[in-house]
């Protein structure tokens, strides 16, 4: 059973998840792989003859969140999108996460189990933070790294963001996810099917006992300067998670082989708000 409060809620979540997946292009497949932390659900799309692009989603979003991007990306890449263990999604935890290091190890197990030796890595929000950590953890596995408004990685989270996030996670009132994502998008209205899925994920996900809530934190200049692969950083002009200009300045300073841009008229959920522009950025970056 998925990690939710009751079997009935788990079934409801899976139904909503499958509705969101109807937004994905035909031709994808989904399957489980085993890790020491539990079963990880993977979506796969595109030809295995193409370069491998592994996508890491934002917190509580699950891999379904890539629905606006995957059709365009799958024309150029072998796209793999896991549901991050310990969060709402179809992955099933069996061993509690105790620290961020456990997430690094989990992701490495996923990549090893998939038989991949070289990947392009892209992450949104929480996924951007995790992608950065993994690049530091196993640098020889990553060819290029793309960060889409990476949470906390480059600049401290704003007080308002933290207060709203904790209220959503700890006091999930009806439509908490809808309210939070509308604020995050600064007027952008997410797809209703995805919002319905995310709402149940936020409100009714049940982590294992003794599992620590893993929140992203700032990564030091010393560590970021160790990254020796090209890094693309995209920051939403209207992002509310941090000061966009501060994040941009730091990205341009700390990455040895980096390019960083403000995406105009865009909030935190940039892959959904301006999917074509984000796909174009990624394709040009990975093939340049």
Image (cartoon, rainbow, N blue to C red):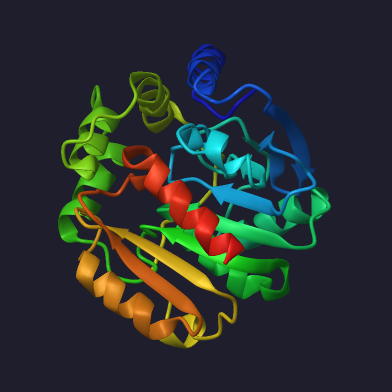
Residue 131 lies, in percent from the top left, at 54, 61
- Residue at horizontal 29 percent and vertical 71 percent from the top: 247
Q: Is residue 167 left or right of residue 93?
A: left
- Residue at horizontal 60 percent and vertical 74 percent from the top: 136
Along the line of sight, the residue nearer the viewer: 40 or 226 = 226
- Looking at the image, can residue 81 be seen? yes
Vertically, is 208 above or below 150?
Answer: above
Vertically, is 85 above or below 159?
Answer: above
- Residue at horizontal 27 percent and vertical 68 percent from the top: 156
The C terminus - image quarter? bottom right
The N terminus - image quarter? top right
Vertically, is 171 above or below 85?
Answer: above
Along the line of sight, the residue nearer the viewer: 129 or 4 = 129
Vertically, is 234 above or below 13?
Answer: below
- Residue at horizontal 59 percent and vertical 58 percent from the top: 121
Q: Looking at the rendering, which quadrant does residue 78 occupy?
A: top right
Along the line of sight, the residue nearer the viewer: 50 or 93 = 50
């Amino acid at each position: 059973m998925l990690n939710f409060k009751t079997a009935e809620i788990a079934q409801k979540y899976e139904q909503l998840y499958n509705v969101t997946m109807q937004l994905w292009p035909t031709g994808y497949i989904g399957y489980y792989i085993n890790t020491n932390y539990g079963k990880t659900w993977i979506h796969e799309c595109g030809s295995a003859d193409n370069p491998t692009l592994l996508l890491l989603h934002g917190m509580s979003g699950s891999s379904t969140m890539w629905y606006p991007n995957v059709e365009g990306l799958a024309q150029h890449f072998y796209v793999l999108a896991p549901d991050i263990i310990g969060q709402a999604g179809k992955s099933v935890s069996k061993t509690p996460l105790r620290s961020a290091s456990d997430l690094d190890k989990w992701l490495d197990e996923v990549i090893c189990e998939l038989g991949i030796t070289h990947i392009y890595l892209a992450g949104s929000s929480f996924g951007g933070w995790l992608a950065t950590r993994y690049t530091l953890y196993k640098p020889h596995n990553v060819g290029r790294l793309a960060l889409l408004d990476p949470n906390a990685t480059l600049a401290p989270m704003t007080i308002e963001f933290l207060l709203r996030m904790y209220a959503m996670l700890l006091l999930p009132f009806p439509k908490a996810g809808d309210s939070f994502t509308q604020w995050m998008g600064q007027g952008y209205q997410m797809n209703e099917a995805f919002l319905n899925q995310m709402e149940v994920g936020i409100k009714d996900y049940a982590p294992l006992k003794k599992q620590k809530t893993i929140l992203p934190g700032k990564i030091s200049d010393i560590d970021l300067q160790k990254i020796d692969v090209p890094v693309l950083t995209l920051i939403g002009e209207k992002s509310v998670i941090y000061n966009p200009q501060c994040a941009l300045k730091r990205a341009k300073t700390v990455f040895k082989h980096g390019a960083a841009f403000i995406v105009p008229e865009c909030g935190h959920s940039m892959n959904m708000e301006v999917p074509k522009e984000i796909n174009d950025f990624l394709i040009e970056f990975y093939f340049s």
